[in-house]
Image (cartoon, grey):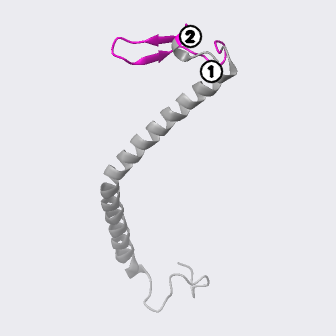
Amino acid sequence: MIQCKDCEMFELRPDGGRLFRCDPFSTIKEPECLAKWQLMRIEMLIGTFHSMSAWQEKLAPVQDKILKYVKRELEDLDETERWKLPDDEDPDDPNPPYPV
């Protein structure tokens, strides 16, 4: 099995980073190369997921406040519309005594 460091598609950057010029559709040399490429992509997806989770944790308190505010506003709207219904009428009644 060829090691990535020995492949011409691999490049070591001056800052120590690794650059893979592999293309799974055209430049894969061995089946193991495809497995390594898939592992690198999965690691990238996991890193992206972790960063999104961190952002979600930061935004969660703000989202909670917004949802509470919206809920309170909707309840206030319901309260202001309540005068239109008679007191003895059930708003959930499927057969009201007269059309609303």
- The residue lying toward the viewer, choosing from 55 and 7, is 7
Main SS of the magenta segment? Answer: loop
Q: Is residue 89 left or right of residue 55?
A: right
Q: Is residue 40 left or right of residue 17?
A: right
Q: Amino acid at mark 2?
A: Cys
Residue 94 on image: x %, y %: 61, 82
State the residue lying farthest toward the front: 1
- The residue lying toward the viewer, choosing from 18 and 85, is 18
Give the residues drawn in magenta, as a range: 6-28
State the residue lying farthest toward the top: 8
As for residue 12 lying within the magenta part, the answer is yes
Q: Which residue is mark 1?
A: 33
Q: Amino acid at mark 1?
A: Cys
Callout 1 touching callout 2 (CB < 8 Å): yes
Is disc 2 placed on a helix, strand or loop? loop
The crowd level at tag 1 (other Cα within 10 Å; few <14, some 14-19, many 20+) is: some
As for residue 64 lying within the magenta part, the answer is no
The quarter of the image holding the N terminus is top right
State the residue lying farthest toward the right: 31
Residue 31 on image: x %, y %: 69, 22
How far apart in space, not on screen, are marks 1 and 2 (Cα)? 10 Å
- The residue lying toward the viewer, choosing from 52 and 34, is 34
Quadrant assignment, res 28: top right
Residue 84 on image: x %, y %: 41, 79
Q: Is residue 40 above or below residue 28?
A: below
The crowd level at tag 2 (other Cα within 10 Å; few <14, some 14-19, many 20+) is: few
Q: Which residue is mark 2?
A: 7
